[in-house]
Amino acid sequence: MLKKTTSFGDLEVFDAHTHFFSRKFFETLISQSPQLSGESNAIERAGEMTGWTMPPRDPAELAAIWTAEFDRHGVTGALMIASAPGDEESVAVAVAAFPDRIAGAFMFDPTKPEAEARARRAFDDLGLRVVCLFPAMHHYSVAENEGVRAVAALAGERPGTAVFVHCGALSVGVRRKLGLPSHFDMRRSNPLDICKLAAEFHKTKFIIPHFGAGMFRETMMLADLCPNVYVDTSSSNKWMKYEAAPPAQFDLPVIFKRALDVVGSERLLFGADSSFFPRGWVASVFDAQINALSEIGASEEQARAIFGGNMRRLLNKR
C-alpha cells in the first residue's frame, strides 16, 4: 500500500476529488465551440488553446497514466469524476482497469429525460459510486427537482455511494480556455437548498466540495444540521477572497479549525482537484492542507481520517 511521508507520519492518501478528462470530454466541449466544431484537427487545436496534453482515445490508457502519476506521488487512489454529462462509460473503463486505485464518479444533469434510469445504470451496470450535481451549471433547484430526488433515493439504497453537489462559486477553466460561455445561475448554489433533501434521505451521503466554494458559513450550517453531509477540502480554495475578514484572519488554517470544530474530522474529505496533464496530481494542494492541519495542532488520527480513511469508509473500500 502506497503512503506519503508527512509531519503526521506515513499517511495513506485516497483523494476524494479528481477529474477524469477523457477524449470524449474534450470532444463534447469541442462540439459546443464555434471555433473548433467541424475542424479535422480539433483535438490538436484544443491542446494548443489550453496548453494541455490531450488524452489518448482509450480511457484505460488514460487511467494507466493517472495511476502512474499516483504512484509517483505516493497516492493510493482517487475518486475520479467523468466531467461531462454522458461520459460515464469513460470513467467506468478506468475503474474496470484499476478497481483498487480508481473509484468512479460522474457529472449528471437531472433535468434530462429518463434521469432515474440513467443514474441507475451508472450505479448498477457501470459500477460508479458518486453522482455529481452542478445545479448552477444546469439551471435547476436541488430542493425542487424530481430528478435530484430520484438519484438521492437511489444512492440511499446503495451503500458505498454518494451524491456530490457543487455549491458556491463555479468557474470551469477549460471552458474559458476554449472560449466557451459559462451561463451559470449562481442563485442555485446555496448549500442550504440541500438541507431538506438531506433530512428526508437520511441514508444518503451528500458531499459538498471546496468547503462550499465561498459559502463556507452555509456549508457549516448544513453539515452541522445534517450528519449525512460530508465536506471536501479540494482545490486551492481561492474562494477565501470573498470573505469579509481580511486574508490574515481567514486563511486555510482558520478554515480547517472551524470545520473541525463544527463538522469534526470524520466528515472532512481531502481533495486535490487534479484534472489535466502535464500538471498532473496537484501536490501543492496536499502540502498546503498538511501544513494547515499541522499549524492548528490536528492529531495524527484526524489527519489519517481526512486524507483517506473517511473516503474509504464512505465508499465501503476497506
Image (tube, helix red, strand yellow):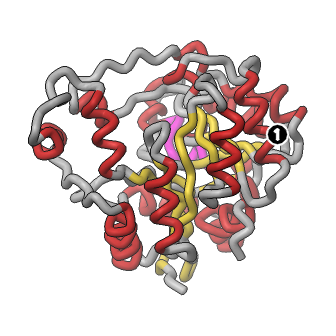
Q: Is residue 261 visible?
A: yes
Residue appearing at x 44%, y 55% in the figure? 90
Residue 184 horizontal/vertical position (percent): 46, 18
Residue 33 image-quadrant placement:
top left
Mark 1 residue crowding within 10 angstroms, few (<14) / some (14–19) / many (20+): some
Q: Quarter of the image containing the N terminus?
A: bottom right
Residue appearing at x 44%, y 43% in the figure? 83
* Residues in magenta, as a range: 249-259
Find disc 1 in the rendering and name its residue. Answer: 153
Residue appearing at x 52%, y 66% in the figure? 95
Asked if the stretch drawn in magenta spans residue 253, the answer is yes
Residues 164 and 214: in front is: 164
The secondary structure that dominates the magenta segment is helix
Residue 126 horizontal/vertical position (percent): 60, 58
Mark 1: which secondary structure? helix
Q: Is residue 295 visible?
A: no
Residue appearing at x 29%, y 42% in the figure? 26
Left or right: where does residue 227 sit relative to residue 279? Answer: right
Left or right: where does residue 99 sit relative to residue 20? Answer: right
Q: How many numbered dots are placed on residues in this image?
A: 1
Residue that extends furthest to the bottom in the rendered view of this protein:
1
**Above or below for 17 versus 195:** below
Residue 259 horizontal/vertical position (percent): 68, 45
Residue 10 horizontal/vertical position (percent): 54, 82
Asked if the stretch drawn in magenta spans residue 250, the answer is yes
Q: Quarter of the image containing the C terminus?
A: bottom right
- Which kind of residue does numbered mark 1 sit on? Ala
**Above or below for 77 versus 137:** below
Left or right: where does residue 50 sit relative to residue 181? Answer: left
Residues 282 and 114: in front is: 114
